[in-house]
Amino acid sequence: MKDKFDKKSYMKAWREANKDKVRKQKKAWNEANRDKVLAHKRNWGKSCKHKPIVYLLVNENYIGVTESIKRRLSKHKNSHNRDVSEVIELAQFETIEEAIYFEAALQLSYGYKGFNYNQIIKFL
């Protein structure tokens, strides 16, 4: 147990003593790999895309549209604290406009959360 404590205190002291060195190394790495990191981020978003899907979060009583279901469910779960344990794919469309029309029709007729009036007006 003493060894762990000594290692922790040593590492903390080392980080404090070498703040500038670590900061410079991090900055140099970020500058050297900037293009690679940006390309990876762009490609990840493209690889997840598919035809527009209208989906239902059953436990949240929420209908939505997305071209990247994996990313959208992750955002629902992490940013909005929604329950994404039960998802139903209602329909898949060729264009986003068709999907938004379908979503709007469902929301108007069934009153689901996630209703965005601006989306409907924009495509009418």
Image: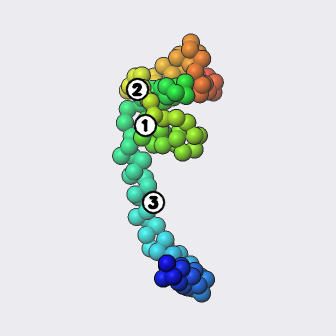
Q: Nearer the viewer, mark 3 or mark 1?
A: 1
- Residue type indicated by callout 3: Leu
Asked if 93 appears above or below 27 in the picture, the reply is above
Residue with the mark numbered 2: 89
Among the two numbered marks 3 and 1 on one chain, the one whose residue lies closer to the N terminus: 3
In the foreground, 60 or 93: 60
Look at the image and tell me whether residue 24 can be seen. no
Image marks 3 and 1: residues in contact by CB distance under 8 Å: no
Image marks 3 and 2: residues in contact by CB distance under 8 Å: no
User: Which corner quadrant holds the C terminus?
Assistant: top right
User: Where residue 94 sits: x, y (%)?
Assistant: 38, 26
Q: Residues within 10 Å of mark 1 (few under 14, many from 20)?
A: many
SS category of the residue bearing label 1: helix
Residue with the mark numbered 1: 69
SS category of the residue bearing label 2: strand
Cα separation between marks 3 and 2: 31 Å
Asked if 8 appears above or below 67 in the picture, the reply is below
- Residue type indicated by callout 1: Ile
Q: Nearer the viewer, mark 3 or mark 2?
A: 2
In the foreground, 38 or 85: 85
Residue with the mark numbered 3: 38
- Kindly give the residue lying farthest to the right in the view shown: 117
Residue occupying image coordinates x 49% and y 71%: 30
User: Where residue 24 sits: x, y (%)?
Assistant: 54, 81
Asked if 105 appears above or below 43 in the picture, the reply is above
User: Where residue 114 sits: x, y (%)?
Assistant: 59, 28
User: Where residue 79 sits: x, y (%)?
Assistant: 57, 44
Residue occupying image coordinates x 43% and y 37%: 69
Horizontal arrangement in the rendering, residue 16 relative to residue 43 (left or right): right
Among the two numbered marks 3 and 2 on one chain, the one whose residue lies closer to the N terminus: 3
- Residue type indicated by callout 2: Glu
Image marks 1 and 2: residues in contact by CB distance under 8 Å: yes
